[in-house]
Amino acid sequence: MYLCLPHTCCIILFLKDLPLAWHLLPLPSDVLVLSSAGIIREALVRHCGDWLGRPPSYLGSLVSHGGQDLALGGPCPGWRQQRGAARGALARAGTRLGPLLWLQGQELCEELRSHGGAPLDPFEVFTFHTCSTIARLLFGDLVPPPGELRAFSCCLGELLQVWGRSTVRALDLLPPLRALPNPGLRELLRLVQHRDAFVEAQIRRHQECPSPPSDTVLGALLGCDPGVQGAPLSPLRLHMALVDLFIGGTETTAAALGWAVAFLLHRPELQARLRAELRGLQGPPGPGDTGRLPLLQATVSETLRLRPPAPLGLPHCALRHTSLGGLPIVAGTILVPNLLAAQQDPVIWQQPEAFLPERFLSPGAPWRSLLPFGCGARSCPGEALARAELFVFLGLILREFRLEPGPEGLPGLGVSPGTVLRCPPFRLRMVPCQPPGSP
């Protein structure tokens, strides 16, 4: 079937039952769609150096200031320095992750409790609290006020939605359209300006503080942390690294949390089992409790299997002639890792379209075929953070609330094209099932 999805900047031919498919449209470059975990790993892990490039994108260049970010930038020395600095800063700041997630999770539950069990759309709440988690990790005590942060989290969501509009994405495929007025493009540029103004204000706040916190991601990137080696990033690389961490840690995590809640509304008996598992734990769940909460960990993994946040990842571009699956590939070929199809491959997964976290509790679970954040040198640097957020937040929600459908009934579970794979809007009731904070 044909899918028009924004990740590829083009219309591609998707053959779900084949691991490898070529497009059949007259595009500037060959487009190769990979729909098998094995061949995705072959390309992005075994031949990672061949596929480090990103294809040129008019819109991508606009939102990343010419490819100065981690996600869309090409493999130049500045990008390599930026990637190493961001990964190192996240690893060092990760020592604060447990207490930070507990604090943010308590605030999340307090906001949900304030609705008194009335129907609510959870996505905006989830988006704000995932954004707040990233802000605390990046800025520490210099985190912006809640109102400012909430407006910024809304800006990020709107930016991705506008970017995903077909009338906007068409500018990548059909350059002559760029000469015509485009209200969507104007809106996109306005949101980028809002995004950049917020990030610049946080950097200035940190730089002007007499005693800025050093145990933060921003402190490490600015060279305030004495344990971090290497030259500081250029101002634009620093700015765009923070932008990427915000986008990757806000919208995608909130979307996955929304999917988890939607799936669990369809399986109340699984909710009860998860709640029993959580009550067997002494205290609230933390990032280090995955081994003691196997069903909760399996639920997170199954959610990410069925609904990876970016179902087609980001496109790669061959930097040189290479081969894949025994076929010769010319330099400049665009590769699209179809994570959604690979993680529902019936050869690997029994009942591939069913929500069955129990599949991950068996000793032979195919963990290597689970690739929700991609793989290889260009995999998502915030994967560990996103998994920890999902684990802790979902655990706290299930520990303190019983999830019930809203007046409209059970949510739909269908997927639709978009920059981030969101659940269709729905409302639910979160009914407190025990006093706040009780064991």
Image: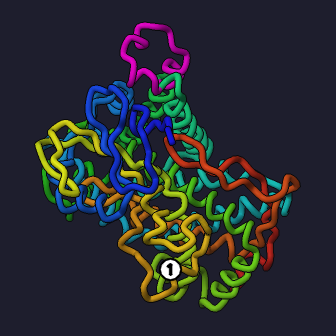
The residues colored magenta run 169-188
Q: Position of residue 233 (x, y in %)?
A: 21, 44
Compared to residue 142, the image places residue 278 above or below, namely below
- Asked whether residue 222 is in view, the answer is yes
In the displayed structure, would residue 320 be above or below residue 58? below
Residue drawn at x 46%, y 50% is: 310
In this rendered view, identify the residue nearer to me: 311 or 42. 42
Residue reaching furthest to the top: 180
Q: Amino acid at mark 1?
A: Phe
- x and y percentages locating residue 42 in the rendered image: 23, 61
In this orientation, which residue lies closer to the viewer: 103 or 316? 316
What secondary structure predominates along the stretch shown in magenta?
Answer: helix
Q: Looking at the picture, tell me which residue is in the foreground, 235 or 36.
A: 36
434 versus 326 height, above or below: below
For residue 331, side relative to residue 432 (left or right): left
Residue 176 in magenta stretch: yes
Q: Considering only vertical position in the picture, is 124 above or below 307?
A: above
Residue on which the image places disc 1: 360
Q: Position of residue 416 (x, y in %)?
A: 59, 44
Q: Is residue 216 left or right of residue 158?
A: left
Spot occupied by residue 405 in the image (x, y as percentages of width and height): 81, 62
Residue in the picture at 79% in, 59% down: 410
Which of the pair 81/298 is nearer the observer? 298
Residue sitting farthest toward the right: 407
**Secondary structure category for the residue under label 1:** helix
The quadrant of the image that shows the C terminus is bottom right
